[in-house]
Amino acid sequence: MGQRSINDLGETMLTQLNEIVNGGDDTVKAQPNSFVSWCQPGIPFEESDFDFAVKGLGGGADAEEDKLLLQQAFNFSQVVDFIPDASGLYKDDQQQAIFRTSEARLSHMYHEILNLSRVVDTPLTEKEKEKIEKFRNLLWVKKEEKNIVTDEKKVVTAAGPIQEAYDNALDKYIDASMSYGMARIQAEGATGVDGKAAVANFSVNGDLLRLKVKRAEQEWESRGHRSDVDAINAYIAQVTGKSMLLWKQRLIDNYNDSLRDSLNQGGQFFYSTVIPGNFAHAKGWTNYSVYHSEQSSTTTKERTSWKAGGKMNFGLFSIGGDGGSSKSTQTGEFSVSDFRMEFEMAQVLVSRPGMYPEFFMNRGWDLDAGHGWHFDGLPSDGEDPPKGLFVAYPTTILFVRNVKITSKEFSSEYKKFAKEISGSAGVGWGPFSLKGSASSSEETNHFESTTDGSELTVSGMQIIGFKNHIINKAPNLAEGIDKENLV
């Protein structure tokens, strides 16, 4: 069998993963308002890092466990508190930037936009106010939470039963869609003896997988209240377009309610969590594999779009090392005559109780330098690709675990490269971490791979990318609204 560039194999894999995540046929249609940011390198986590999402803050058996849960929440919230850009890459320097400056954070910019926006103020009727309040209380609830530092009780915002049902049903729909997409893409790209199983699987199970997608979509509609939640959000956006002053204040209050006190770092952080909370311990992750003889020609067109993720070099590279340097060095491209990569993958929803993206859909607000907006630019120009300070936000995390690469040449190249770099430096390939550690402020997760002949195994769990929702032009003041009437 002939040689294939490791870079071509990597590109084929990212093309397939992008279509699996974003959809691409009549069963799971492509999503036009989303794009993928690939990590470089992957961000390692341990299963126990998500205990806070299962037990909840304050849900520990004792004070020591409560402190650990709070630290876990802080670590995770920092990782997802970034604004993606159209480059489609989330590199190491960007990952580290959110720990160094608040201005690199999604939460900081969202708060600034809320605070400095000027909104229309046409008074609502009492009936409209009552209906909006009723709808909001159906989706979100207030509950008391004890501050483990001060013992004071604080009222926080959390998803209500209907919103929880919506999110859980959406998560099941995403799982069904990904399983179908994984089987379809692998069958379409299958070649040679290694591809026989993928073709047979889709031939036999394709209808069942399509049925699972349809069933999950029906469950999302019925038990997940999909139409109800969408209608509620549409009504709120429409009515508050006349008078946004009270709504804006409510959003600011919800943002403040979502701030948590950090123990070791001082100050506060913007709380975020995952749905489902127990995903790390779940068994239903989707299997994926890519092998040497697969060709990229059938999906090359997908990689020409910026929405498929940024251009990535698939040479081995090093990150960090003694002294904490984030500089990376890459090897030249090399080729292999045999290659197979396998892993399990899960898409996990990001939940931010204090952030309401619906604000950006509303056309009754504006920003201008004469009224406090001193940033160089606006949130989004709405172009394709978009430019601005807040063009998108991460909605879904792409986790992989149990990564295994079978290739004598790749394993040999990896071992040679690993010997040449600092012992504490990490080694990455594309969006994957193969060796090293990931630091989340006070927390460090060590990540090691093992080689056995032609096999390289990475048994841990890591984030390889994020699926992001694109924000249309913002602000986008509706025609007929006089800026002089904004408050």
Image (cartoon, rainbow, N blue to C red):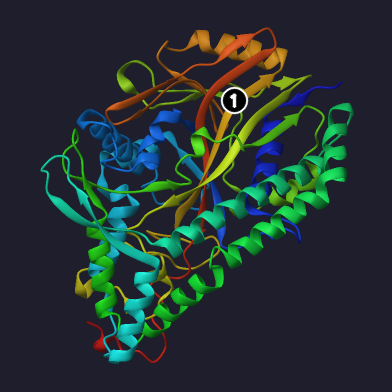
The residue that appears at 40% across and 45% down in the rendered structure is 80
Q: Specify whether 387 is left or right of 111.
A: right
| Residue wearing tag 1 | 402
Return the x and y of residue 314 as percentages of the image width and height: 61, 30
Q: Nearer the viewer, residue 428 or 251?
A: 251
Q: Nearer the viewer, residue 285 or 436?
A: 285
Q: Specify whether 25 is left or right of 257.
A: right
Residue found at the very far front of the displayed protein: 61
Q: Is residue 28 visible?
A: no
The residue that appears at 29% across and 85% down in the rendered structure is 483
State whether residue 440 is above or below residue 79. Answer: above
Return the x and y of residue 389 as percentages of the image width and height: 37, 59
Q: Amino acid at mark 1?
A: Asn
Residue 342: quadrant of the picture: top right
Q: Nearer the viewer, residue 248 or 301?
A: 248
Q: Is residue 448 visible?
A: yes
State whether residue 249 is above or below residue 375. Answer: below
Q: Secondary structure at mark 1?
A: strand
In the picture, the quarter occupied by the N terminus is: top right
State whether residue 480 is above or below residue 99. Answer: below
Q: Specify whether 469 is left or right of 479.
A: right
Q: Nearer the viewer, residue 459 or 57?
A: 57
Return the x and y of residue 18 as percentages of the image width and height: 64, 47
Residue 474: quadrant of the picture: bottom left
The residue that appears at 45% across and 68% down in the rendered structure is 381
Number of other residues with Cα within 10 Å of mark 1, as a class: few under 14, some 14 to 19, many 20 or more: some
Return the x and y of residue 69 as percentages of the image width and height: 30, 35
In the picture, the quarter occupied by the C terminus is: bottom left
The residue that appears at 42% across and 65% down in the rendered structure is 380
